[in-house]
Amino acid sequence: MSNHLLRSHAPISDANWKLLDDEARERLAVALAARKLVDFSGPHGWEYSATNLGRIEPLAATPCEGVTAARRQVLPLAEVRAEFALSREELRDDDRGASDADLEALDRAAHQIAVAENRAVFHGWSQASITGISEASPHHGLELGEHPDGYRRPVASAIEQLLRSGISGPYALALGNEQYKRVVETAEQGGYPLLDHLRKIINGDIVWAPGLDGAVVVSQRGGDFLLEVGQDLSIGYLDHDRDVVRFYLEESFSFHVATPEAAVPIKP
Amino acid sequence: MGFDQYHEPPEELPADTRTFARLCASLTEEAEAIGWYEQRIAVERDPQAIAIMRDARGEEFKHFSMDLEFLLRRSPQWREIAEGILFQTGDIVEHGEEAEAEASGEDGDASFADDGSGSLGIGSLKGA
């Protein structure tokens, strides 16, 4: 199994490792919105390098006459890393039984790497050859608008567009950070929470998606979007000095849209 | 009846371990039901009754598969071993031995098993 994380070289206790892993897991599970909405394959390991697309690209030049040739098309996995440093004194206090170790740098790194994964899935990442759900979708033109009271209409329109395209449910709604905040804060006349109303419209889950601009309604029937993970999110050891230990959160992944029409993006 | 899927005092078990245990119990029940339908179908002579029981057995296949997938998503090491065995052609025992050998480390807690890779074991969160 992979040992490139060099965890055993870090000058911290087993209890410290448990503290860091638990904290990271807790933070990531909340913010990894894309994983709540798309199909997942893996983990396939650190050595895994590419997703099979099942397609070929014809090659005009061949080694000799009398043969044809083609090259397999694959989607390479991208590696994402977020570094952070923690005070050795704080970690020693954890060993003494302190229950309030300062792990803010870890929390920030966890949030950033979750945002990176979410953005790649929702908006794409051209340098990594990843096309996102929103940019792949043929459905465009919907906007949420400034006021959350107006969110119901574009969300209902998105569902209607999916149905018209023959995309079955269940459906889910992902909301960017700002949009989610506005929805949660809004109660309609009579005090009925907008969050509940939107949930009734889509007849499915609403997901907080940091890194997403606006919103996207996604079919949950499966088979439309695939997040393929090589090394799943892990904490590795980088280096240390007298005062701090430096770590990183890391994963490798690719993302592929099989059915572009199975999601409808809604601009902010 | 009730809570005998727990081997340890339920109040001492974390919530995710209780969920894991419930699905393990459900998996067992679905497998038992599949075995019962197999026997009933083997002895029944009424074609209509056989058709109904075949349909019911199909439901149990579905339930068993859903239970299994849920548990595999929660246990990376179990998933890794299962991937080496399920839907393969050839010698099942051989695949089992190879898959076990490749999956190093011991399962930790049920939800977030430490498979020795250093992974946080988050995996899919769809439906979580």
Image: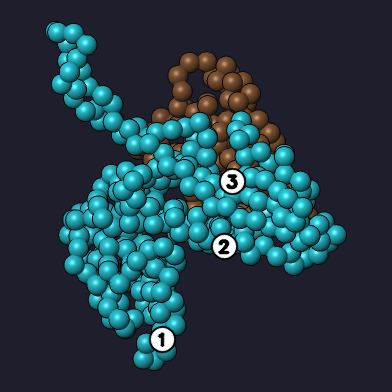
Number of callouts in the render? 3
Q: Quadrant of the N terminus of chain A?
A: top right
Q: Nearer the viewer, mark 3 or mark 2?
A: 2
Marked residue chain, label 2: A
Marked residue nearer the N-terminal end (3 or 1): 1
Q: Quadrant of the C terminus of chain A?
A: bottom left
Image-quadrant location for residue A211? bottom left
Q: Tag 1: residue type? A: Ala
Q: Is residue A81 visible?
A: yes
Is residue A192 placed above or below A35 in the rendered structure? Answer: below
Q: Is residue A77 left or right of residue A144?
A: right
Image-quadrant location for residue A61? top left
Badge 1: residue crowd in 10 Å (few <14, some 14–19, many ≥20): some
Q: Identify which residue is drawn at 35% across, 56% down.
A: A122
Give me the chain that's brown.
B
Q: Is residue A126 left or right of residue A91?
A: left
Q: Identify which residue is drawn at 57% across, 50% down.
A: A249
Q: Tag 3: residue type? A: Ser
Badge 2: residue crowd in 10 Å (few <14, some 14–19, many ≥20): some
- Give the residue pinned by disc 3: A234
Q: Nearer the viewer, mark 3 or mark 1?
A: 3
Which label belongs to residue A108? 2
Give me the chain that's cyan.
A
Dot 2 lies on which element? helix
| Residue A227 on image: x %, y % | 40, 45
Q: Tag 2: residue type? A: Arg
Is residue B71 placed above or below A209 in the rendered structure? Answer: above
Dot 3 lies on which element? strand
Q: Residue furthest right?
A: A96
| Residue A149 on image: x %, y % | 32, 83
- Give the residue pinned by disc 1: A187
